[in-house]
Image (cartoon, rainbow, N blue to C red):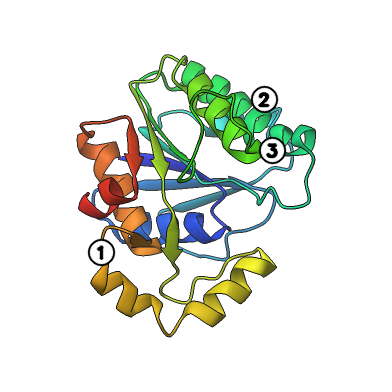
Amino acid sequence: MDVVIFGASGMVGQGVLRECLLDPDVGRVVTVGRTPAGQQHAKLQEIIHADLLDLSPIESRLTGLDACFYCLGVTSSGMTEEAYTRVTYDMTVSVAATLSRLNPQMTFVFVSGAGTDSTEKGRVMWARVKGRAENALLRFPFKAVYMFRPGIIQPLHGIRSKTRSYRIFYVIARPVLPLLKRLFPRAITTTEQIGRAMLAVAKNGARSIILEQADISRL
């Protein structure tokens, strides 16, 4: 299986990249982003590309792919809805349009979030925009599309968030997260689990297109 990861330098993307490189069923891992993922591996092909609204310069390197793990995202804190929409909706739809044309048999896995608003009408800005992106993805002619809606994610294996506020949270919560994970295994996932769960749906599918925290842990 050949896969592409968008956002491989972020916390979730790092976890997905790690599991893809470890998985013997994955033959080629392409990463696309503005900065290097910081990994070296025989399977890995890094593409540094700044403008995700225009993938035409790199289209020739995005063919023959079986799955896309779209992990690119930003916190909505301090952002206007217009700016957040550009990153969360416009870029996602642009990437999906190109990949669905080049790889119509691809499985597309989108990292959304717990509380995403599928109606697109709620009061919470980020949830509306995420819901709009989810709904748009379902209209593309992929083989399959899955929405991952994790809540609390425990970073493992030295992985760190790029967002300062998240890093502070994880430093404070680190002593209790393992205990909470044991007590509430379906309430908290890890970067390792989310990576393995994405690979599982890419290989075998899932019963639902929307996968909440408990579904991710079960997978």
Give the camera-side residue of 92 and 164: 164
Q: Earlier in the sequence, mark 2 or mark 1?
A: 2
Which kind of residue does numbered mark 2 sit on?
Ser
Marks 3 and 1, how far apart at CA: 31 Å
217 vs 148, left or right, is left
Q: Amino acid at mark 3?
A: Val
Marking on residue 87: 3
- The Cα–Cα distance between marks 2 and 1, rounded to whole angstroms, is 43 Å
* CA distance separating discs 2 and 3: 18 Å
Q: Position of residue 97 (x, y in %)?
A: 56, 20
Nearer to the camera, 137 or 60 = 137
What secondary structure is marked by label 3?
A: helix
Assess disc 1: are there few (<14), some (14-19) or many (≥20) residues with their C-alpha within 10 Å of its C-alpha.
Answer: some
Q: Of residues 44 and 177, which is closer to you in this image?
A: 177
Tell me: 109 left or right of 101.
left
Residue that mark 1 sits on: 185
Residue 135, relative to residue 35: is it above or below? above
Which corner quadrant of the image does residue 156 belong to?
A: bottom left
Q: Residue furthest bottom?
A: 175
Q: Nearer the viewer, mark 2 or mark 3?
A: 3
Disc 2 packing (10 Å; few <14; some 14–19; many ≥20): few
Q: Secondary structure at mark 1?
A: loop
The residue indicated by pointer 2 is: 56
Horizontal arrangement in the rendering, residue 189 relative to residue 76 (left or right): left
Residue type of the residue flagged with mark 1: Pro
